[in-house]
Image: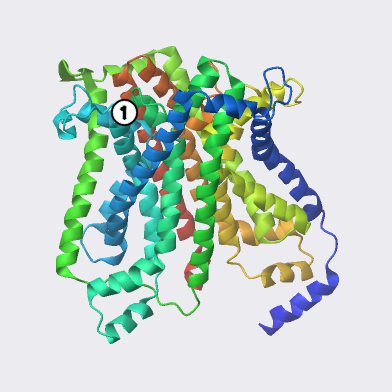
Amino acid sequence: MAEISAVSGMAARQVRPDPTGQIVPPVLLVVLATATLLPIGALLVRAFLGKDGAFVGLDNFLRYGAEPGLVIAAWNSLSLSMIATVIAMALAFPFAYALVRTAMPGRGIFRLIALLPLLAPSLLPAFGMVYLFGNQGWLKGWLLGESLYGPVGIVIASVFYVFPHAVLILSAGLSAGDQRHYEAARALRAGPWRRFVTVTLPSCRYAAISAASIAFILIFTDFGIPSVVGGSTNVLATDIYKLVIGRFDFEMGAVVGVLLLLPAVVAYGIDWLARKSQRAMITGKSVPIRAERLPLRDLMLFLFATLVAVAILGIIGMAIFGSLVKFWPYNLSLGLQNYERLFTDADEFRALGNSLILAFGTALAGTGLVALSGWLIARKLGNGMVRNGLQGVAMMPVAVPGLVLGLGYVFFFNNPANPLHALQGSLALIILCTVAHFYTVPHLMVVNELLRLDREIDLAAQALRIGPAGTARRIHAPVLLPTLIDVAGYFFVNAMTTVSALIFLFTAQTRPASIAVINLVEGSRIGQASAFAVVIMALSMVAAAIQLTLRHLVIRAQGWRRQTA
């Protein structure tokens, strides 16, 4: 330790200007600002302009308020999102609690089942719902006379869609408790229920707020589910599509984009405050939580988790079954005809190829940019103001709905005066938009992993006249490699399944598979649409399996990890 301190002292006297820290951060800031900040700015500006490009103030917003259908759509989006969020949280909390805080059997299997929806487009649960509860569904009587195509369908499918996200966040929050609090409660003779109310709930309240905020944003801005089971119920996500694509009313589309952005920003602000407070609750003296065995509670939660798992598998299984049926519901014989059409129809096959190119391109470009931005910020390279700007731009996408970002890309890149106008309609632009849309979470993964390294390592490298690039190659890259594999998998899967961010950007030649599913639904070819969604999920599952395998092999090959564990 004394040697490291001595070397660090030498480094403090021998620090020389670093070209990497002076040149790379501003360039990267310009790239990320072009991918996120400028398109959002273009959308905000367009909301205050008329069709002739002149400034009209709030006229577009007043025109929006004068159209009753659009106001109703805003109310539907807000109310249905709140209802679905409450239901999703009511299901996700006990499920996450069962995974983390109990000794019930099969927790690993239940966790895998809960995360399955993450590998599928949001449209897949909607297809399963149609086959189960639609007008010709097997279980339509369960809806007590209500139609699936409307508020009921949107709420049920949205709960299924956001459930795994809520479970992940709540599981992390429930894992971060302090066992000492429970020991103190037992010493005071508090029973299981009192310990739950006075210790468990307060310790995870911030995780619950964060999970609810993320669930609300996802539901409020989702386009796929309302387009399949929304029926005549208008929401903002579908109205913005109708305004831009159907009526070519870009100004009103920009207004709806602003309305979609505001609740998402508020929800993210609440989430940010919750996460900030949660970090302050964890100290270096905290003792990890140990699962407590309570047979009756564990049995009840096991039964609950089983019901939820059966529901998830049932909905996914029904979508797969529907994709194999020849003609629902009149000819239930099974076959691969819907899948064969995907590979014999040139347009659909091209869409599948575009999705693979999009996913690989997003994984490569996104992982590279995230590694660079995370490294610059975590290791404090470059000017502090530029670095703070880089962090702010990297955090922005998580609060921006995909529909809003995609429409911002239309306004920004479709402008003939923009030197980047040539990118409009290309796969390169779609890749850029997808990277920007999902940038924040991988960026935080890289930053948090690199912050685990002591700053003394960088100072010692400087004393040995090893530049930042050399330090990154010899030290940072090996430490970061497993995380970068996870980042690449995250980008790949999300690029395969996303819909909303790309709905305004594709052309006939660059249409990805997730958009092709929407087009098939619009053409009333739900069997083929289900088959396409199942293929997307299968490819995402293969990618996830490859990711886990590569990560395991890398960790096994890095023997120093076992020595320092």
Residue at the spot of label 1: 150
- Among all residues in the image, which is located at the extreme bottom? 187
Viewer-closest of 492 and 302: 302
Residue type beneath disc 1 = Gly
With 259 as the anchor, is 7 left or right in this view?
Answer: right
With 398 as the anchor, is 328 left or right in this view?
Answer: left
Viewer-closest of 306 and 195: 195
Task: Decide: is 15 above or below 394.
Answer: below
- Where does the image place residue 522, in percent across and percent down from the top left? 38, 17
Colouring of the image:
rainbow
Q: Is residue 290 visible?
A: no
Q: Name the image quarter holding residue 324.
A: top left
- Where does the image place residue 430, in percent across and percent down from the top left? 58, 29
- Which residue occupies 58% across, 35% down? 258
Location of the N terminus (image quadrant):
bottom right
- Where does the image place residue 174, in percent across and percent down from the top left? 37, 64
Under circle 1, the secondary element is loop
- Which residue occupies 30% across, 52% down? 90
